[in-house]
Structure formats: structure tokens, C-alpha cells
Image (cartoon, rainbow, N blue to C red):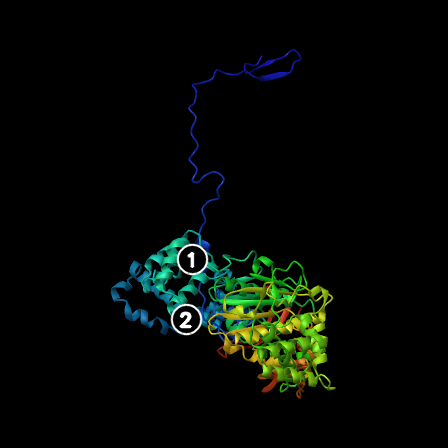
């Protein structure tokens, strides 16, 4: 029987016999945890510091500056790989041949004269170690000179750079050493130079601890800019930073980031990446393969994007730009108003401070029909543009002055009597010429002794009977807003919370949802109203350091002569608009040229029609290019030997011997033709031209919006 086990009655082998236990072992205590149970580890600020220290060189307009490596303006001459290797092989064979001729004495012994002149006679003894070393060193020197010469001739260095280890590296090696304190942006050298070293130390500590985000850095930098310009005191800024650290100088909403981000943003430069510039011969070499981004310096000239449904206008352009402007609003740099259809995917409601859902009973905010102004003439001008701006003569010199006069003749007396502007039902009754409201208005003016306003009302009553009176048209347009779905909106009694675009003096984020489903005409009219109020408000701001932008997801029916003139005035007011259209046919023909001229950035997305492409081709103009004409001329042999060679060549190649003639000439052609814009732009791509507020511009670029 085995000593290590026992056998039971059934003959099965039992387990091993337990041995006597040794001395009891003392239990070892587990190591003490670094943090309390259930708590996450402390954050690490290395990712933020790496982002902050990444180079952002000054580049051409539209290039994504984060980590960009500048490229030369012109494309260097690139030898084909097959020609490069064949030339390198031939150069090597030539060098080998030269060395063989020298070594075997076919070229004489002149190349050994320097050796004989340098070594002493005592070293020339047979089997001298010194002479052997010197002679073979001289051989290596001569061979090296030949190698260098044929290597430069055969471009061995280019083969090494193109196909050797330098080409295997995925990117440039990063310098992991931290920069000097006076050059480190994470150390806030500007604050230290101004005497706020304590605040700089607090901010640098929060950055290293992972408590600072890109929005925090941009917001505090904006507050420091206010200190430098004199809007805030240094003591107030320093006290806020020492108290709250990275959370100092907060946005009025208290938010420090958006709930979700879909695009890549760089708040240090204020850019949002839209895609990658295609590696296409039609793009300038300096732009090929680089990231393409938009910033406030480009949006300040306004952007027009045209493309059919599904081409990527909302997801690839509107949503990233709106997201970027909301982030900059949290940093105190911008104010943004985003207008689109309900459910258009313009970002979650939590990403905005004010969400106006027109026609929805759940909307917390209302829209001020008169833009928050107390001047009847100003309110009449904005409202007339919204109501009948699309009915005005589309030629650039026209306007809606008659409609403005009609509305002013009613808004002024009504405000003088009631202290407010009329609501939608009251305005409709006045425009329709209802006797009771006009009589009550007359009595109120007579009681107040408003003789000048009585004359305005008398003039309005006289014009009501004329055939060409525009009051009926205005009443019909106001009737589109006098619907049960809008019964709780556009209130002027002070019982609601109306939003006015006068608030663009502050870094506010606003989204306006239009009721396009079932109320398409009313939605277009409200979009014109928001655009008219925006252009009227931002141009009269006292503080224009805050960038203001209106993002209009669908500008169908919005482009009018007055709106085009308003867009032209935005650049000097540090403001801009982003407009999208499915087709330029939604814009009257006389206004297409002025609209394309008023916007500095123009985008043509894939799938557009040749008619739309023709307008873009005209505004982008032409350029001088090099055209090469190649002519093949057949060679006629005269001698019998030449004829035999030609016959043999024709039998081998199947073609007659020819001589090629190349003619190079300068021609002027369109940068992008209408046919190319309609048929040569791949899906998910767009052709985009850019102009910044300084006047620098980029030619039309083919951009992949999916990368």
C-alpha cells in the first residue's frame, strides 16, 4: 500500500494522508491603500499640459494649427521610385567601374602620388605595419570619395529618406522636456510679468493636478484680457483666482463644458476642425493633407454653404460650428444664436442657455416680436423686413420702405396710448382696418393730446382705401402668426419671458426651434425676423470685443435685399452669419451675386446642380495655369538599316516608331468649373474658399468632411 494514500472498501484510491502541520504562520497585513475605498484615483493633468504645450504655428487661413507642420508653398520635384532606384543602381555600377579601373591600374598610378608624397621612406619597408595601415586607410579614403560622389549623383540620400527608417516613423519625435518657465504657457508668464505670481502659481497647480480644462484656460485668459484693457481690476482678478482656482470667473450659467462634443476643438486658437484637405492636384501644395478648420477670424466674414439634402450641411458644418461657438461663449468670447427646425440635430438643450421652441407649449422662453426696442420706427423697420421682405423688388437698390411706413403709422400711436407694442391679434386688427380698435386708438390719442401721432393715424386711414395699399398684404402675413399654435407666443403684456437679441452684449448661447412642420411660411418669416433683429442689434453694440454669430440652418426664403446689406455690415461689427441653402434657386436671381459677394467664405457641397456650380465658378474666377500639349510624330526611316530596325520595333511593340514633341504654354482657366462642381466632387466632400477679416484668403479647396 502506498504510504501517501489509503484504499477504501470499493478499491478506489483515497486522497493523500494529511501530514502534521508546521509552526503557525503570522498573517501579513495588506498594504495601506493610497486613497479611501470607493473613490477614484486623483486626476492627472498631463494630457491637458500636453495639449497646452503643443505648437500652433502661424499658418495660412483655414489650416488646423494644432500640431501643424508647415509645408513649402510649391511642391518639390519628386522623382518616380522606379527611376530613382535605376539611377541609384547605375551610379553604383559607375562607381564600381571607376574603382576597378583604379585598382587594376588601367587609369595609371597618378591617384597614388599623394600617398607617396605623405609617407616617409622609412615606412616603405616590406611588411611594415605602419605602411600597411596608412596605405589601406588611403584606399578607404579614395573609395569613400568615389562613394560620396556617385551617391550624390544617384540620389542615395533621397532613397534613404523616402524608403529608409526616417520614413517608417509615424510622426515627429516629441520633445518630452518641459519648456522653460518663461516660455511655458502652463506657468502663465503674462500673469507673473504683471505681478500676479500668486495667481499664476494657483493656476499652474490646478493644471498639474488635472483640475483645469481647455474651457477654463480660455475663460481665464479672456478675463485676463479684460484686466489688460482696463475693464477689470488686477486685484479683483487675483482674488477670484486665488479663491476658486481653475473655476474662477465663471460663465453666468455656471457650466464649464458642454454635455457632449462631436467635433475636435482647439480653444487656444478658437478653431473647430471640419475635415481634411484632399491630396488633390487642384489644391495648393501647402494645403494638401492638412486639417481644415474654421475660427472667428473666418466666420467674421460670414459663411454660405450650398448643397442638397443629405450632403452634410447640418452634421458636417452647422453642428461643429455651433458647438465651437457655444464653447467660446462659455469662455466669455462669443455670443451665438442657432436657428433651425425642431429636431434638426443642432445640439442638446443642455448646451444652450436659452431655448425658444416656437409653437411648443413646453417652451420656457418666448421670442420678442419687436426685438426689445422702444423706438416705433426701428421696430417697424425690423418687422416689415420679416413680414414682406421676400416680396420686395429683389434688385439690390430696392427696399421695404412703404411697409415700414405703414407699420410705423400704427405702432407709434399704439405705444403712446398703451405703453407697449400691439400683440399679434391687435396688430392684425389694426392692419385690417377694424373700426373699433382704430376708434379706441383715436380716442386715446385725443385724450393725451398727441397731435403728431393723430396725423399719422389719419394718414393710415386715408391710405386704407387706395388700391395699392400694402396694409392688406401685411395683415395677411401677420395672420400666419395669429394661429392657435402660436397663441401663447409673441406676448407684449409682460406676462411671458421673451428673449431679445439685445442680449448679445453678453456671452449667451441661444437656440431657436422653428415650427417648420405645418407652418413653413411662418417659419421662414420668423427666420427673417431673427436675421433682421440680429443685424440691427450687433451693429449698434458699444462693446464689440465679444464675437456674435447667427447660425441659420436653412436660409430658404430669408435672403432679401435688406438682409444682404445687413450681412455686408457685420464684418466691421465683429459679427458674422452662417447660412445654408439646398440650392441657390431659393435666392432670387438678382440677389445671388450680391449674396456670394457679401460672404467671405463660400462652400459648395457634393451633389449640387450645374446651375448652382456656374454661380460659384463665376465668383471664384479664373487662374493662370500651365498647359502641356503633347504631339507624337511618326519617324520615317530612309536607309535600309533604319527600315529594318523600325520593322523590328513595330513587330515587338505593335506600334510605329514616333517622336514626341511637348509644347508648354500659359492659359487662363476656371479654378473650378460648373461641371466639375456638379460631377467631380466626391460624396462627403466640399469645395470651400476662405477669407478672414484681415483680407487674407485661400483659393477654393477640396475638403473631405468625413475625416
The quadrant the N terminus occupies is top right
Q: Which mark is residue 651?
A: none
Q: Sequence-wise, which precedes: disc 1 or disc 2?
A: 2
Residue at the limit of the structure toward the top, as seen here: 9
Task: Tell me what residue is drawn at x 68 percent, y 79 percent.
Answer: 390
Which x, y percent locates residue 29?
A: 42, 30
Which element type, helix, strand or loop, lies under badge 1?
loop
Image point (72%, 77%), residue name: 435
Give the side of residue 32 with respect to residue 431, left or right: left
Q: CA distance from mark 1 to mark 2?
A: 84 Å
Q: Measured from the top left, where is residue 260 in percent x and y?
A: 57, 56
Regarding residue 583, the answer to whether it shows in the image is no
Out of 497 and 213, give the one closest to the viewer: 497
Image quadrant where one finds the C terminus: bottom right
Give the image quarter of residue 649: bottom right
* Outermost residue, bottom side: 638
Indicate the position of residue 448 as horizontal and vertical percent values.
Answer: 58, 77
Viewer-closest of 257 and 113: 257
Q: Quadrant of residue 223?
A: bottom left
Which residue is located at x 67 percent, y 59 percent?
A: 361
Residue at mark 2 = 105
Observer able to see residue 538: yes
Task: Kindly check if marks 1 and 2 are in contact, taking CB atoms under 8 A apart as contact.
Answer: no
Q: Characterize the local packing of mark 1: few (<14), some (14-19) or many (20 or more) Cα atoms within 10 angstroms.
A: some
Q: Residue 589, position in %: x, y? A: 68, 83
Under tag 2, what secondary structure?
loop
User: Residue at label 1?
Assistant: 248
Amino acid at each position: 500500500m502506498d504510504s501517501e494514500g489509503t484504499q477504501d472498501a470499493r478499491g478506489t484510491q483515497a486522497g493523500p494522508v494529511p501530514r502534521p502541520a508546521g509552526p503557525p504562520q503570522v498573517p501579513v497585513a495588506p498594504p495601506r491603500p493610497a486613497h479611501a475605498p470607493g473613490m477614484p484615483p486623483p486626476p492627472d493633468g498631463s494630457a491637458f499640459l500636453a495639449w497646452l504645450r503643443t505648437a500652433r504655428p502661424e499658418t495660412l487661413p483655414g489650416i488646423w494649427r494644432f500640431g501643424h507642420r508647415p509645408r513649402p508653398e510649391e511642391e518639390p520635384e519628386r522623382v518616380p521610385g522606379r527611376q530613382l532606384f535605376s539611377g541609384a543602381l547605375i551610379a553604383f555600377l559607375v562607381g564600381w567601374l571607376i574603382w576597378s579601373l583604379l585598382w587594376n591600374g588601367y587609369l595609371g598610378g597618378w591617384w597614388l602620388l599623394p600617398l607617396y608624397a605623405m609617407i616617409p621612406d622609412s615606412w616603405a619597408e616590406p611588411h611594415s605595419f605602419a605602411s600597411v595601415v596608412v596605405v589601406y586607410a588611403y584606399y578607404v579614403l579614395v573609395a569613400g570619395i568615389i562613394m560620396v560622389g556617385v551617391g550624390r549623383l544617384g540620389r542615395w540620400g533621397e532613397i534613404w529618406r523616402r524608403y529608409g527608417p526616417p520614413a517608417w516613423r509615424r510622426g515627429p519625435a516629441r520633445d518630452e522636456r518641459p519648456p522653460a518657465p518663461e516660455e511655458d504657457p502652463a506657468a502663465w508668464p503674462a500673469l507673473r510679468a504683471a505681478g500676479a505670481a500668486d495667481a499664476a502659481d494657483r493656476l499652474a497647480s490646478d493644471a498639474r493636478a488635472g483640475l483645469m480644462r481647455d474651457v477654463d484656460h480660455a475663460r481665464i485668459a479672456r478675463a485676463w484680457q479684460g484686466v489688460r484693457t482696463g475693464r477689470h481690476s488686477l486685484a479683483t482678478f487675483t482674488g477670484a483666482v486665488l479663491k476658486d482656482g481653475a473655476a474662477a470667473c465663471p460663465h453666468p450659467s455656471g457650466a464649464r463644458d458642454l454635455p457632449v462634443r462631436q467635433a475636435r476643438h482647439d480653444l487656444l486658437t478658437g478653431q473647430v476642425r471640419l475635415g481634411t484637405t484632399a491630396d488633390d492636384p487642384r489644391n495648393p501644395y501647402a494645403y494638401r493633407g492638412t486639417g481644415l478648420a474654421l475660427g472667428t477670424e473666418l466666420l467674421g466674414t460670414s459663411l454660405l454653404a450650398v448643397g442638397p439634402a443629405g450632403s452634410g450641411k447640418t452634421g458636417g458644418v452647422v453642428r461643429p460650428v455651433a458647438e465651437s461657438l457655444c464653447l467660446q461663449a462659455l469662455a466669455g468670447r462669443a455670443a451665438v444664436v442657432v436657428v433651425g427646425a425642431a429636431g434638426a440635430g443642432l445640439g442638446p438643450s443642455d448646451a444652450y442657455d436659452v431655448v425658444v421652441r416656437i409653437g411648443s407649449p413646453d417652451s420656457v422662453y418666448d421670442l420678442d416680436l419687436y426685438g426689445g426696442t422702444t423706438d416705433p420706427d426701428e421696430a417697424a423697420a425690423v418687422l416689415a423686413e420679416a413680414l414682406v421682405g421676400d416680396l420686395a423688388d429683389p434688385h439690390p437698390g430696392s427696399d421695404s420702405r412703404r411697409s415700414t411706413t405703414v407699420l410705423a403709422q400704427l405702432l407709434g400711436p399704439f405705444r403712446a396710448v398703451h405703453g407697449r407694442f400691439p400683440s399679434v391679434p391687435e396688430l392684425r386688427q389694426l392692419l385690417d382696418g377694424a373700426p373699433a380698435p382704430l376708434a379706441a386708438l383715436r380716442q386715446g390719442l385725443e385724450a393725451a393730446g398727441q397731435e403728431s401721432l393723430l396725423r399719422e393715424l389719419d394718414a393710415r386711414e386715408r391710405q386704407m382705401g387706395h388700391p395699392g395699399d400694402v396694409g392688406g398684404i401685411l395683415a395677411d402675413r401677420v395672420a400666419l402668426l395669429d394661429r392657435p399654435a402660436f397663441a401663447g407666443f409673441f406676448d407684449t403684456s409682460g406676462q411671458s419671458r421673451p428673449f431679445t437679441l439685445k442680449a448679445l452684449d453678453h456671452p449667451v448661447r441661444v437656440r431657436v426651434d422653428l415650427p417648420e412642420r405645418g407652418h413653413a411660411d411662418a417659419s421662414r418669416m420668423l427666420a427673417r425676423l431673427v436675421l433682421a433683429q440680429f443685424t440691427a442689434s450687433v451693429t449698434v453694440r458699444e462693446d464689440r470685443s465679444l464675437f456674435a454669430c447667427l447660425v441659420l440652418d436653412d436660409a430658404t426664403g430669408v435672403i432679401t435685399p435688406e438682409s444682404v446689406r445687413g450681412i455686408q455690415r457685420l464684418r466691421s461689427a465683429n459679427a458674422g452669419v452662417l447660412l445654408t441653402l439646398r440650392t441657390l434657386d431659393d435666392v432670387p436671381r438678382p440677389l445671388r451675386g450680391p449674396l456670394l459677394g457679401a460672404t467671405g467664405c463660400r462652400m459648395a457641397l457634393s451633389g449640387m446642380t450645374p446651375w448652382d456650380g456656374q454661380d460659384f465658378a463665376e465668383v471664384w474666377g479664373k487662374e493662370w495655369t500651365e498647359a502641356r500639349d503633347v504631339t507624337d510624330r511618326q519617324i520615317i526611316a530612309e536607309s535600309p538599316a533604319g527600315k529594318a530596325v523600325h520593322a523590328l520595333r513595330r513587330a515587338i511593340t505593335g506600334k510605329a516608331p514616333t517622336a514626341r514633341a511637348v509644347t508648354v504654354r500659359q492659359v487662363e482657366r476656371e479654378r473650378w468649373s460648373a461641371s466639375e462642381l456638379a460631377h467631380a466632387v466626391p460624396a462627403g466632400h466640399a469645395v470651400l474658399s476662405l477669407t478672414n477679416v484681415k483680407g487674407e484668403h485661400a483659393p477654393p479647396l477640396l475638403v473631405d468632411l468625413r475625416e
